């Protein structure tokens, strides 16, 4: 890492010609697990930060923008929220947001990297805010692909908080038609599958569009949405999928009722923010309308 007079720097490489640097005030942990490299840092602008394989996963200052966007549009639209499944989500923040809903009877979280979960509990307890100790939480350290194949339960919401499906990522095997079919089979009628779905800038939206095109073969409603996440220095996208619920069209009164019933106060998401999330710019709508590569 390059040095200045006052700081060392964590430099994230978005692309061969694009970098974003964070000034580091403290390094809590840096090492490898059997699955990925991990760093837990404190940065000058965004506070504590989790980094996996050189990519920022979330930061103390704005993780609620990401996690509320990932969780709540899908939860508000789902017909039944009693059982929720999270794939990934090692920090515990996705689990935290789900369990703020009093109607959730059980939330199952499956993450392959138990060391990341333990590091998050030790260094990033604000992310989970007690969710790991909630009696409604079932945390399984294991292979999400194996779990989906063998699990016989059904869920009102399935949330994929996995890393991007790049060829060198441990989550790449979870992005193909067979897995999409298995996830759909795990949904109850009116259920929603939502996933973090890469970047949505005019210059880096190709992977997101590929993911959206792939999912259209399996679900009637496939809706892209996005927001800017400052710590990522990027517009970050999500996809909500369902055969019955058009998440983009969720009524404002339904969202208000849902948000009003959550424990605590939201930082980012409400009915007005919902409209903003799904108001896609023209360049992204054009890209999503194009034919192109899909995950087989």
Image (tube, rainbow, N blue to C red):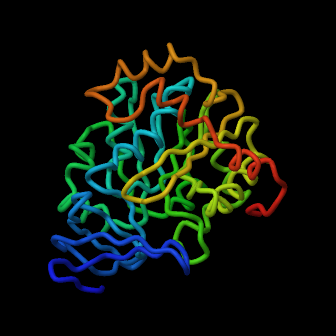
Asked whether, in this view, residue 206 is left or right of residue 87, the answer is: right
Asked whether, in this view, residue 177 is left or right of residue 207, the answer is: right
Asked whether, in this view, residue 262 is left or right of residue 83, the answer is: left
Farthest residue, direction front: 5
The quarter of the picture where the C terminus appears is bottom right
Farthest residue, direction right: 291
In the picture, residue 59 is in which quadrant?
A: bottom left
Q: How far across and how far down the image is residue 200, in percent?
A: 59, 54
Which one is nearer the viewer's eye here, 67 or 220?
Answer: 67
Q: Can the viewer see residue 276 in this picture?
A: yes
Q: How far across and how far down the image is residue 82, in percent?
A: 45, 28
Which one is nearer the viewer's eye here, 37 or 188?
Answer: 37
* Rendered residue at 42%/75% (across/down): 53
Q: How far across and how far down the image is residue 265, in percent?
A: 28, 28
* Rendered residue at 43%/65% (across/down): 112
* Rendered residue at 56%/58% (across/down): 199
The quarter of the picture where the N terminus appears is bottom left
* Number of marks in picture: 0
From this view, report whether residue 207 is shown above or below residue 194.
Answer: below
Q: How far across and how far down the image is residue 76, in percent?
A: 50, 26
Q: Can the viewer see residue 181 in this picture?
A: no
Asked whether, in this view, residue 109 is left or right of residue 227, the answer is: left
In the picture, residue 223 is in which quadrant?
A: top right
């Amino acid at each position: 890492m390059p040095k200045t007079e006052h700081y060392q720097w964590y430099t994230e490489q978005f692309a061969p010609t694009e970098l974003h640097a964070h000034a580091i005030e403290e390094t809590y942990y840096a090492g490898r697990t059997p699955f990925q490299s991990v760093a837990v840092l404190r940065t000058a602008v965004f506070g504590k930060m989790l980094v996996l394989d050189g990519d920022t996963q979330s930061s103390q200052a704005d993780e609620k923008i990401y996690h509320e966007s990932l969780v709540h549009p899908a939860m508000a639209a789902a017909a039944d929220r009693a059982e929720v499944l999270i794939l990934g989500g090692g920090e515990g923040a996705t689990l935290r947001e789900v369990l703020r809903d009093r109607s959730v009877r059980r939330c199952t979280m499956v993450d392959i990297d138990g060391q990341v979960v333990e590091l998050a509990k030790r260094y990033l307890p604000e992310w989970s805010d007690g969710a790991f100790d909630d009696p409604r939480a079932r945390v399984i350290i294991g292979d999400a692909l194996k779990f989906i194949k063998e699990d016989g339960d059904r869920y009102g919401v399935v949330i994929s908080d996995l890393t991007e499906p790049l060829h060198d990522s441990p989550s790449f095997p979870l992005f193909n038609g067979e897995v999409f079919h298995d996830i759909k089979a795990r949904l109850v009628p009116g259920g929603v599958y939502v996933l973090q779905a890469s970047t949505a800038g005019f210059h880096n939206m190709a992977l997101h569009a590929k993911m959206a095109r792939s999912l259209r073969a399996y679900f009637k409603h496939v809706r892209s949405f996005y927001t800017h996440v400052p710590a990522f220095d990027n517009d970050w996208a999500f996809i909500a999928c369902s055969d019955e619920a058009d998440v983009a069209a969720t009524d404002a009164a339904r969202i208000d009722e849902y948000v009003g019933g959550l424990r605590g106060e939201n930082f980012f998401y409400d009915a007005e923010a919902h409209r903003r999330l799904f108001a896609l710019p023209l360049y992204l709508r054009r890209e999503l309308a194009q034919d192109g590569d899909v995950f087989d």
